[in-house]
Image (tube, helix red, strand yellow):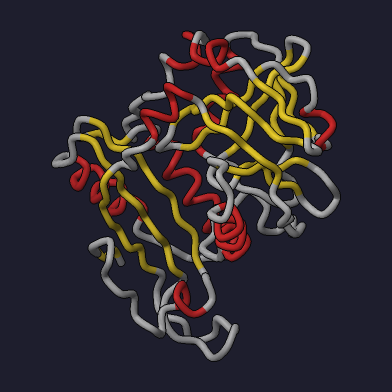
Amino acid sequence: MIIDVKWDDPIPANDRVAQYGDGCFTTMCVSDGKIELFNNHLQRLQHSCQRLHIEFADWDKLQRHLKERAKNIHHGVLKAIISRGTGGRGYSTSGVTEARCYVSQNDMPSHYPMQRKQGICLAMSEIKLAAQPQLAGIKHCNRLEQVLIKIALDKTHYDDVIVCDYQGHVIESSIGNLFWRKENTWMTPLLNNCGVSGVMRNHILTLMKSNNINVLESNFAIDDLIGCDAMFVCNSLMKLVPVKEIMIQQQRQLLNIEFVSSLVWLTDNLHEVSECE
């Protein structure tokens, strides 16, 4: 079942995505009537549903529906939320109706172009992410950790924060994935225990490897950020935003945003439009 909704439409109170956050979602950038990295977004939804044991069956219909919705959008956002369905007693999935997908449209955030040009400042988040390997990487609908992180962030003058887990590993920012460069190697956190494996993150990893760029995906501590000469935050809407300053252990560290902007092999391939077969 596919349901078109407006951005501010209510979801039924007995829907499990409203009751328990029992679902997953993806947020897609639309340019000139086409969805960027469309295949990647669909594959992520399918993979997420498989891991969450959500039996959504209308993949072909959803593919056609999203492509049709995108045709009338010059520059905007489509969001697809897949819910397990309605019903069920308590947490049990027994008696739940068929899975459904809510599709909504919104404007592109207006501040991203300026951030891409001027760079952003990051601090460290005091709120940590819990480890849960069964949910790691999935953009599921239970985002309470991110809500708390944003509440704390809004009380500061920083643009975003670097978020760690309780083992002290760097994971992501509040809105996207992190890459930084140190000693001629790009680094990005391994997301085996928590964090969101973003569509843009995975696209950038593919681009780096295909261009023979040294990139290391591993567990990193906060100290591994010290001495880096470039950093960026990425997601499907913001694309790639350079970081100009990070505050780590009460020390202000300035970074080279021009270096990130000069990566032509990367920045020229972030708007890829992929058509599903």
- Compared to 127, does 99 lie above or below? below
Image quadrant where residue 272 sits: top left
- Residue at x 60%, y 47% (from the top left corner): 196
- Compared to 275, does 137 lie above or below? below
Assign the N terminus to one quadrant of the image.
Answer: bottom left
- Residue at x 50%, y 28% (from the top left corner): 241
| Image location (x, y in percent) of residue 255 | 64, 19
| Image location (x, y in percent) of residue 221 | 83, 37
- In the figure, is residue 250 to the left or right of 91? right
- In the figure, is residue 61 to the left or right of 59? left
- Residue at x 59%, y 83% (from the top left corner): 91
Who is closer to the viewer here, 51 or 162? 162
- Compared to 92, does 104 lie above or below? above
Who is closer to the viewer here, 31 or 107? 107
Number of numbered callouts drawn:
0
- Residue at x 26%, y 41% (from the top left corner): 76
Q: In this view, which residue lies farthest toward the left?
A: 72
| Image location (x, y in percent) of residue 138 | 59, 52
- In the figure, is residue 53 to the left or right of 169? left
Task: Specify whether residue 26 is in view.
Answer: yes
